[in-house]
């Protein structure tokens, strides 16, 4: 708490001094994303200031997107928010991380062959007994979980895909370089859903949290479906950059 400097002899309001101290500590690296801030009780006792002063400072920091409050746990410096060009271009997670100066990493949680799940046969426009490959990825930036992606692809188009180094090479790069399959179009829809218990554990968020779910159907130039995926994004770590053009008359 030594990074907080508050003086009653300065003309600056006390809440502004508290807010500025936190911002300066974050800028200098004394505070980092994920760090817990002092409680109201701790600040009241240490600096002899009132709760309304603390609440005003914290409220402004929340509005500015600097901190977040978790019920029953306290106030924390927010993790860096990633702005994805997900609805503008077929950028990879690695590209998005590099744009904001973060180090990307990928974990493969699940990889399996589905033979009887007719739901994914329908989505991929396959006929049984054609097999479907399922891969679940956990993508992280600077070690912080950013999203979970469940990917489903036709096995006959991507033989031996599960044997590839899926944690070191972006999936779309493997499609192109190893299989000569190029995605020409991706249709995406976004919803708000409640995260599963398993998803909450992987993303390190509270159970019952709402997340963005983005569903993608990716096709090649001949409209053959190459991939169906479902991606789960914690809302406090991700934002989407969307451009809309007015159609000319």
Image (cartoon, rainbow, N blue to C red):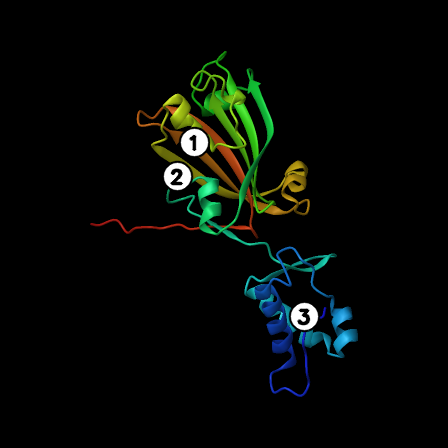
Residue carrying label 3: 3
**Label 1 SS:** helix
- In front here: 115 or 96? 96
Tell me the quarter of the picture where residue 196 sits: top right
How much space separates mark 2 and mark 3, taking CA atoms?
A: 43 Å
Tag on residue 27? none
Instruction: Decide: few, some or many residues near mark 2? Use Cα within 10 Å; few <14, some 14-19, many ≥20.
Output: some
Image vertical order of residue 193 relative to residue 27, above or below: above
In the picture as drawn, the residue positioned furthest to the right comes out as: 45
Quarter the N terminus occupies:
bottom right
Tag 2 near tag 1, CB within 8 Å = yes
Q: Position of residue 141 (x, y in %)?
A: 55, 46
**Label 3 SS:** loop
Instruction: Decide: few, some or many residues near mark 1? Use Cα within 10 Å; few <14, some 14-19, many ≥20.
Output: some
Specify which label sits upstream in the sequence, 2 or 3. 3
Image vertical order of residue 100 relative to residue 5, above or below: above
Residue carrying label 2: 90
- In front here: 104 or 80? 104
């Amino acid at each position: 708490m030594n990074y907080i400097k508050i003086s009653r002899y300065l003309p600056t309001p006390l809440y502004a001094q508290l807010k500025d101290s936190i911002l300066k500590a974050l800028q200098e690296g004394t505070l980092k994303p994920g760090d817990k801030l002092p409680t109201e009780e701790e600040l009241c006792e240490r600096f002899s200031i009132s709760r309304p002063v603390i609440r005003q400072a914290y409220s402004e920091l929340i509005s500015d997107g600097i901190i977040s409050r978790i019920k029953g746990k306290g106030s924390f410096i927010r993790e860096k928010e990633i702005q994805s060009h997900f609805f503008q271009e077929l950028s990879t997670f690695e590209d998005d991380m590099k744009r904001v100066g973060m180090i990307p990493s990928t974990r493969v949680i699940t990889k399996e062959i589905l033979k009887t799940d007719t739901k994914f046969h329908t989505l991929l426009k396959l006929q049984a007994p054609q097999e479907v490959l399922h891969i679940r990825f956990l993508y992280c930036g600077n070690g912080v979980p950013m999203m979970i992606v469940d990917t489903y692809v036709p096995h006959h188009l991507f033989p031996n895909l599960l044997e590839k180094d899926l944690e070191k090479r972006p999936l779309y790069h493997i499609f192109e370089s190893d299989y000569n399959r190029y995605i020409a179009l991706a249709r995406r829809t976004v919803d708000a859903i409640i995260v599963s218990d398993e998803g909450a554990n992987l993303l390190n968020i509270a159970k019952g949290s709402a997340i963005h779910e983005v569903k993608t159907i990716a096709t090649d130039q001949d409209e053959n479906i190459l991939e169906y995926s479902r991606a789960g994004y914690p809302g406090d770590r991700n934002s989407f950059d969307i451009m809309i053009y007015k159609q000319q008359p």
